[in-house]
Image (cartoon, rainbow, N blue to C red):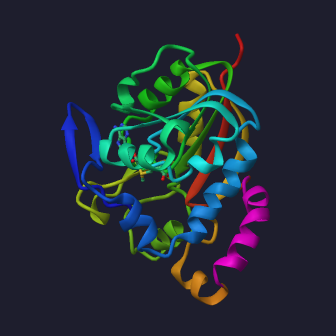
């Protein structure tokens, strides 16, 4: 679970401020998350276009996934609120990456600026997904591709927790959940049907869906090990996509040409 340093309220909006927080070290390097990292990469390799002109990684942090896209794009930009993370990205990738700081609710980019974009592990910070989706749509060119990962409300563990009365959050209710108890800032989780309506309302066409991080469990990692889980993950992303029970659901969206 991400632990953003603090959260600033801006009217109704929430900014999870990672400035001064070493997300790279604390969340990825000091924890056993090789499986989760690989699960993201498997999906991204399949969903991002092979060749891209002008690409942006939205809420891309320190560029954890940059080595999955810099070779596919003529120009790559990481956009994030955290200057701490953007500096880490710049330190590692130099001229191969442009960085831009700002708030997702008002992206500092022109209409139709990018032919492709990525957004991973960020929706859980966003209260107003319709506004976020509209902004992503705005900056994408007609015919462009957006690959967006969504924090899923309707997972199997959440169903069991609800059925066994360990949680009040009903995973079948389509309204977004705000999990205040996990961390002081809380997290938003989205029901697949809800988020798919959000994307369609913006104007996006859903082209492909993947079920990702299907085996995200400390117990499973202990029993089977990361290597086996990663191997299983490769086929599970496609076969389990129709049920959408995984903690991460990846969408490949297209902004139609007209
Ligand atoms: C869990 S991290 C994910 C980073 C990266 N996408 C990855 O998968 O490694 C969430 C990111 O969202 C950024 N973020 C949170 N709220 C934001 C906002 N309102 N505008 C822009 N970025 C934001 C944070 O700074 C952080 O880098």
Q: Is residue 29 left or right of residue 187?
A: right
Q: Quadrant of residue 203?
A: top right
Residue name at image x 47 percent, y 50 percent: 92
Query: What is the quadrant of the C terminus in the image?
Result: top right
Is residue 15 at all visible to an observer of this figure? Answer: yes
Does the stretch in magenta take in 226? Answer: yes
From the viewer's perspective, tell me whether residue 49 is left or right of residue 200.
Answer: right
Q: Residue at x 70, y 38 (%)?
A: 72
Majority secondary structure of magenta residues? helix
Magenta range is 225-241
Is 217 on the left or on the right of 6, as rendered? Answer: right
Where's residue 223, x and y in %?
62, 89
Q: Residue at x 69, y 52 (%)?
A: 43
Apparent side of residue 89 relative to residue 8 in the rendered image (left or right): right
Answer yes or no: is residue 176 visible: no
Residue 33, x across and y down, in percent: 52, 70
């Amino acid at each position: 679970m991400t632990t953003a340093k603090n959260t600033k309220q801006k009217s109704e909006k929430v900014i999870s401020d990672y400035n001064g927080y070493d997300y790279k070290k604390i969340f990825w390097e000091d924890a056993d998350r090789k499986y989760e990292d690989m699960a993201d990469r498997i999906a991204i390799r399949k969903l991002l276009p092979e060749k891209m002109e002008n690409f942006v990684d939205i809420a891309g942090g320190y560029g954890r996934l940059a080595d999955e896209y810099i070779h596919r794009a003529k120009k790559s930009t990481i956009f994030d609120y955290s200057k701490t993370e953007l500096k880490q990205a710049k330190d590692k990738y130099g001229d191969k990456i442009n960085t831009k700081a700002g708030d997702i609710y008002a992206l500092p980019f022109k209409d139709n600026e990018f032919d492709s974009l990525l957004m991973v592990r960020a929706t859980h910070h966003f209260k107003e997904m319709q506004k976020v989706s509209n902004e992503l749509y705005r900056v994408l060119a007609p015919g462009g591709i957006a690959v967006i990962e969504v924090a899923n409300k309707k997972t199997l563990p959440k169903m069991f927790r609800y059925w066994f009365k360990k949680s009040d959050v009903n995973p079948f209710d389509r309204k977004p959940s705000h999990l205040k108890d996990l961390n002081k800032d809380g997290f938003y989780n989205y029901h697949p049907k809800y988020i798919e309506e959000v994307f369609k309302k913006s104007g996006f066409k859903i082209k492909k869906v993947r079920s990702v991080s299907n085996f995200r469990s400390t117990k499973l990692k202990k029993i089977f090990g990361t290597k086996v889980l990663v191997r299983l993950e490769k086929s599970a992303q496609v076969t389990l996509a129709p049920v959408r029970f995984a903690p991460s659901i990846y969408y490949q969206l297209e902004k139609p040409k007209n």
